[in-house]
């Protein structure tokens, strides 16, 4: 038996270690339990993570294999290979109109990695970084790891950011505003008016704007309103191939920013990564060259699965579906079941072996909800809806009370 790890009281961890736990860390407990159950061969349905149930396009896989066979197994530049950076720049310019080149791009190991770098480059102890509720659960730790304080802007109707509150929450300590559009979990896409208000505030207070566009390929036409071409000096755009190409496991992402920002991001990439695998970069170039088809494929897939899931979930007592504008998630308001989102998540997994995510993990706006990823096979979605229906009929205390009262 392994002895539990111990460490001397005299050996100290850094303050950073404390910040890494963050509020979001608990959110994944049911998800990891579901993964472990699946590994044990149990019949579980996992709808708790945004990982499309599609294969990476074969041409991308073939490119990686060919590169590996050709010996592409050595170090590569910290910023990413020039052809990849240029391909990312072309794709970004085509999407949002910001004129840019490979000099504005750094390749990272997913948008998550790029977010970490952006966060470290714009803020530090004593600073504040503002973001919008609801937010992806890794945001709190990824933003606060820099030492800055995360400030949450509450949502108003339809999970849109309360811009009046935003104006109030920006202080002399604020360094940046961070958001994801399309949003995870709500699927909200920020509109022109909202972005204009955010941009004006940023100009007035000299703030960085960090736009996480990891789901942009899933928005209608593969585009979302963006401030990047209007304020290229302060906007940092994050992206990846994870969702658009069903390539979550490849860890291929990037950031696009001003040349000065990119200089610092490369220095951090040098410390952290010292270059990412060349064969993945070659495959990423192939993936970007076929982006229109790949994105059309994922959009069609998500539209069909959303329709299937919406039909299956309709009419389940106690469950109110809140369909997204874009993306691969649907929030279900479960307050009428008499359960919190956390209990609904835990009990649903215990009794029906379906894993979803507690809405409270994304912030106060989505407490009382659970988030479901519907980018799954139709049969899986049908089975999940049947199990959720059974769970609500048999185990929802709110519904039993309503029926007897
Ligand atoms: C809003 C948001 N940002 C970033 C990420 C991380 O994406 P990547 O796989 O590119 O690191 C995710 C993953 O689900 C996400 O939902």
Image (cartoon, rainbow, N blue to C red):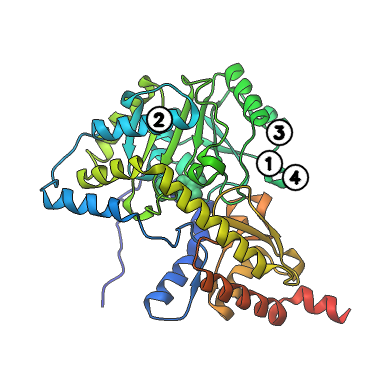
Q: Residue, x 53% and y 20% (percent of image)?
A: 230
Residue located beneath label 3 in the image: 165
N-terminal-most mark, 1 or 2: 1
Residue located beneath label 2 in the image: 256
Does mark 2's beta carbon lie closer than 8 Å to ligand 1?
no
Gap in angstroms between the C-alphas marked 4 and 3 = 13 Å
Up/down of 229 relative to 33, above or below: above
Residue located beneath label 1 in the image: 160
N-terminal-most mark, 3 or 1: 1
Does mark 3's beta carbon lie closer than 8 Å to ligand 1?
no
The dot on residue 157 is 4
Label 1 close to label 4 by CB (< 8 Å)? yes
Gap in angstroms between the C-alphas marked 4 and 2 = 31 Å
Gap in angstroms between the C-alphas marked 3 and 1 = 12 Å
| Residue found farthest to the top | 204
Q: Residue, x 60% and y 74% (percent of image)?
A: 348
Q: How many numbered dots are placed on residues in this image?
A: 4
For the N terminus, give its image quadrant. Answer: bottom left
Q: Who is closer to the viewer here, 196 or 8?
A: 196
């Amino acid at each position: 038996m392994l002895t539990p790890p111990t460490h001397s009281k005299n050996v100290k961890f850094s303050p950073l270690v404390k910040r890494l736990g963050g509020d979001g860390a608990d959110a994944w407990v049911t998800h990891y339990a579901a993964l472990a159950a699946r590994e044990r061969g149990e019949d579980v349905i996992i709808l708790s993570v945004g990982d499309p149930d599609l294969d990476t396009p074969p041409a991308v896989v073939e490119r990686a294999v060919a590169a590996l066979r050709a010996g592409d197994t050595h170090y590569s530049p910290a910023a990413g290979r020039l052809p990849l950076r240029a391909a990312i720049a072309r794709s970004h310019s085509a999407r949002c109109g910001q004129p840019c080149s490979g000099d504005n791009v750094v390749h990272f190991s997913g948008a998550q990695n790029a977010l970490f770098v952006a966060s470290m480059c714009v803020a530090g102890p004593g600073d504040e970084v503002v973001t919008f509720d609801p937010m992806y659960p890794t945001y709190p730790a990824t933003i606060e790891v820099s030492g800055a304080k995360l400030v949450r802007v509450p949502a108003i109707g339809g999970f849109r950011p309360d811009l009046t509150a935003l104006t109030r929450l920006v202080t002399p300590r604020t360094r940046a505003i961070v958001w994801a559009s399309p949003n995870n979990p709500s699927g909200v896409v920020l509109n022109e008016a909202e972005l204009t208000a955010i941009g004006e505030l940023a100009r007035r207070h000299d703030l960085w704007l960090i736009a996480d566009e990891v789901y942009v390929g899933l928005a209608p036409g593969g585009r979302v309103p963006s401030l990047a071409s209007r304020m290229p000096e302060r906007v940092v755009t994050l992206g990846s191939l994870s969702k658009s190409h069903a390539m979550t496991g490849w860890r291929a992402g990037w950031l696009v920013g001003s040349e000065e920002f990119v200089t610092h991001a490369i220095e951090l990439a040098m410390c952290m990564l010292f270059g990412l695998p060349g064969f993945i970069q070659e495959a990423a170039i192939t993936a970007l060259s076929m982006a229109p088809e790949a994105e059309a494929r994922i959009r069609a897939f998500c539209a069909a699965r959303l329709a299937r899931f919406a039909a299956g979930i309709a009419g389940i007592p106690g469950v109110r579906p809140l369909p997204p504008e874009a993306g691969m998630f649907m929030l279900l308001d479960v307050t009428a079941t008499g359960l919190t989102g956390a209990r609904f998540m835990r009990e649903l997994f215990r009794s029906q072996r379906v894993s979803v995510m507690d809405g409270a993990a994304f912030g106060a706006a989505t407490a009382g909800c659970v988030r479901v990823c519907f980018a799954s096979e139709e049969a899986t979605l049908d089975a999940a809806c049947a199990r959720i229906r059974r769970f609500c009929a048999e185990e929802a205390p709110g519904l039993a009370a309503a029926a007897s009262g």
